[in-house]
Amino acid sequence: MAELPYKRHMGKREGTDWPPRRLSAIGDRWNAILRPAWLIALAFTVIADLAGTAYVLHENFEIQPVFFAVGLTVDIDEPEGPTVGPRGKEAKQLGIEKESRIVAIDGKPQNPENGIESLTEALRNAPGPAVQLRIAAPDGRLHDYRLTRSPIHSQEFEASEPLSRDMQLAIRLATSLLACTTLLLCAGLLFLRRARDPVALLLSFGFLSLAATMDPPLLMWLGLGFGDAYDVVSSSGWVLIVVALAAFPDGRFVPAWLRWIVPLSVLLAVVLSIDEIDPTIQIPIAVLLPIGLIAMWVLRYRRLDRGIERQQIKWAASGFVAGFVLVGLAVLAALEFGDANSRSANLLIVIAFNLGLVLLPLGLLVSLTRFRLWEADVVITRSAAYAVVTVLVGIVWATSTDLVKEMVTAAMGQHNTTVSASISAVLAAGLFAPTQSLVLGYTKRRFGKYSSKLKTTAERLPAWSATASPADLGMRALAAIAESVHASRAAVLTLTPTGRELVAARGIEEPEALAAPETVPEEDPRFTLQLPLEDDDGPIGTLLLGPRSDGNRYNRDEREALQALTEPLAEAIRRAMDRVQREAGVHKMISAVEERLARIERGGHAGPDPAPA
């Protein structure tokens, strides 16, 4: 986006109000300050991610095994300190509850607020094959337990898990680092390509903050007792992202009252960072406000004509919604099914959360960098169609399973669940193909109406050539091309015995200069695609196209569609030119006859007027 100018609004200049009605482009002075600040934030985030990864490995191979040895698991709970729960059968039989706290080891008092490292060291140094622990339950009641040290505790737990602990750790770190890397790359590309765009800059800093406070550095922040610093960094990132969402995509707050998000988000960030406030209040604030801002995008989207800004909103909303759905499902699953003793379930929750964070910035990145904006219709339509098919098939399979099971049980007994499952799978498979065809056909008709524009134009060209002039025919063809492939500029030139002649042009200043003898249109940097116009009688001219309106080159499908149009267009132009030439000859002949008749009427003969005496 270009520099955002100050504009008059209701007698005041935008930019003089507070809160501002729009975010102004970053000037040279602020750019000189923000560039080193961004580099510092980038270095801080990279160091946090690397240190967080190292801490996760330390926690899994140095800390957790000490607790596993006595049949316990340990979790970090900031700021009160680490909590423990049962892992082996012995601890469960003794009645140790989750989120309990160790207050004494072999009679020696322990302060949980000293951190997990202190507690781990005390438990590691406790002598003997058994350890006497005093544990405070979640309700505050104290209990004394004697737990034996034995590898059997871990063996019992691992036997119930489908994946080994090392494999689960590897998957967790891989998805977490993928999310961190995606956020870092998106932040870097936004800053490098849109350093003066305030929305892109806010999102870039916000993504860095998010990458520095998610897993794996999250565990490091809490494990080292830096909960307050974590709150500051994460809350600051939340504010930046919220303000950017309110001003997306061009820095204007639409509706205008959204500018009050700037001070409101700062106040809400303070609420989110206070540990004493109930999480049931904090989570809706953190989640519902961004959802409300996305709803504002929908209102803005409907007010816009089809163009770049509309596609920007579509891409950004798609990425944000897809990412938010996965993150939201992960949070709900963690609240409902989160269990420290079910590592497989926790792993699935972590994977969903991390993949959501991968999707979250991608749509915004595509939108603000304007990369392949016009592919949004195809990508989103196909994704939505396949999602609909998947949901329908899942519903049929789920509902038919119970029904078929009852029928099979009534006919064959209760030990034929395999038969009922097989019948349900066949029903779902039989539904998949027709449902897929129906849904994809509808979405193509509903959302892909512009993809067939070039084909329709090629079919209409012969009819146009019978009545329209070459200039009119060329303008109609260029209008169809601009609507179909979103060409920013285009021109049609024909060959003449002395050079070239301009037939039609669109989006070009001083188009007549293209036909000048000293001009070589094929070397003009304004045109990224030059297609020769040639029919069975030979070459007739050239179709020149500038880049797409989103600044990208044409993809293969677009080039093939344009190539298929060149021959019909060449034939139509040649026919129109021949027709115009014939009509011009007829008109010339008629004019000559009318002139001769006029002379006969004036002088009584058809010859030349006699010379004066």
Image (cartoon, rainbow, N blue to C red):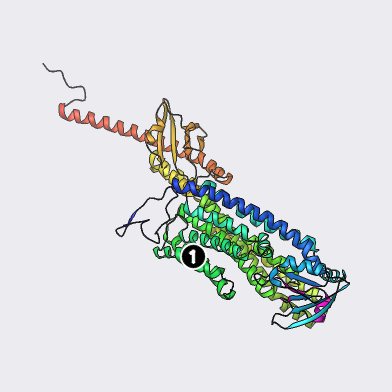
Q: Which residues are magenta?
A: 80-101
The C terminus, quarter of image? top left
**Residue at the extreme front of the image, as rendered:** 108
Quarter of the image where one finds residue 303: bottom left
Q: Position of residue 526 (x, y in %)?
A: 46, 37
- What residue appears at the point 19 percent right and 28 percent down from the top-left corner? 600
- What residue appears at the point 56 percent right and 61 percent down from the top-left corner? 320
**Residue at the extreme right of the image, as rendered:** 129
Residue type for callout 1 = Val
Q: Position of residue 469 (x, y in %)?
A: 38, 40
Within 10 Å of disc 1 (Cα), the crowding (few <14, some 14-19, many 20+) is some
Residue 39 lies in the magenta-colored region: no
Q: Where is mark 1, residue-wise?
A: 266
Q: Secondary structure at mark 1?
A: helix
Quarter of the image where one finds residue 227: bottom right
Which residue is more in the foreground, 205 or 317?
205
Q: Position of residue 571 (x, y in %)?
A: 48, 38
Residue 96 lies in the magenta-colored region: yes
